[in-house]
Amino acid sequence: MVSLISNLEEHQISSRILGKKQVYYSLEVLEGQSQAVDVLYVQDGMDYVRLGKLQDAWHHVLKEKGRRDVHVLLILVPPSTSEERYHTYHPRGTQHHSYIHFFHQELVPFIEKQIIETGRDIRKKGLLGDSLGAAVCLALASEEPKGWTHLLLQSGAFIDFHVDKIRKIETKVPWNVYQVVGSLEESVTYPLTGETFPILSANRTLYEALPPIAENHTYYEEDEDHLWDFWRRDLPRALHYFLTKG
């Protein structure tokens, strides 16, 4: 059975909410004849390609895990600058709420309409992100908690805002949460603003808050620092979780 990982394709969506044309990229992972599609939205999308070696991670997962009948559509959304990244991903950013609304009201419906028009069904809908990208994944899922099935959170730069959002969810939701953090990430300074994130403590707090609402929850602490080398090596395990859990 032949595995196929497509070339990256660049697209644009005209966003009324953001007031601009937002660039995104798509990547498909295919193996077998599955008509059901698992959609994974990736924050910091091009960093995951360049620094996280996303295609290599998929090759590893398909080769080593023996998975069959795979059809994953990845939607990679890259911020254009570090300033835009902060202002869209951080809850105190000037574009954060607009970005959340763009995702739910424009991007996701646009992608899902395209899938449905091809006659395929959507089986899973997940979010992948690192650091502030993981934090905005949690913010997105918390806004529409029943609309997401998988959260892959690498070293999330969570603050009280995110945990408060989780604690306000009163019913069980269909989340399968993969959470990883490094033991050396207790004091991480964001270069753009000088803000310090206690990432290890914040992830431990989130770990305690999730079980009452999440369907499944897998948590790892590794002897690692806040670096792309860590997330790159961890990525095959996170993607395998997305394929096999739920």
Image (cartoon, rainbow, N blue to C red):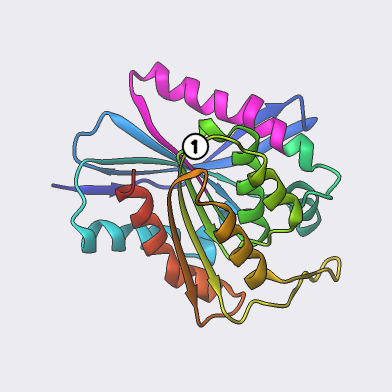
Whether 121 is drawn above or below 211: the answer is above
**Magenta-span inclusion, residue 63:** no
Residue type marked 1: Val
Q: Is residue 106 above or below residue 244?
A: above
Image side of residue 43 versus residue 115, left or right: right
Tell me the residue at 77%/28% (across/down): 17
Left or right for 195, reference 117: right
Residue drawn at point x = 52 percent, y = 43 percent:
213
Label total for image: 1
Q: Where is residue 163 in the image (x, y as percent from the top left)?
A: 68, 52
Which SS type dominates the magenta stretch? helix
Nearer the observer, 182 or 35: 182
Residue located 51% across and 83% down the image: 223
Horizontal and vertical percent position of residue 226:
62, 75
Q: In which quarter of the image is the C terminus?
A: top left
Which residues lie in the magenta part?
Answer: 100-127
**Considering depth in this image, is 15 or 240 the residue closer to the camera?**
240
Crowding near pointer 1: few (<14 within 10 Å), some, many (20+)? some
Circle 1 — which element? Answer: strand
Per the image, the residue denoted by label 1 is 173
Place residue 51 in its image quadrant: bottom right
Image location (x, y in percent) of residue 232: 47, 69
Q: Where residue 41 sits: x, y (%)?
A: 52, 43
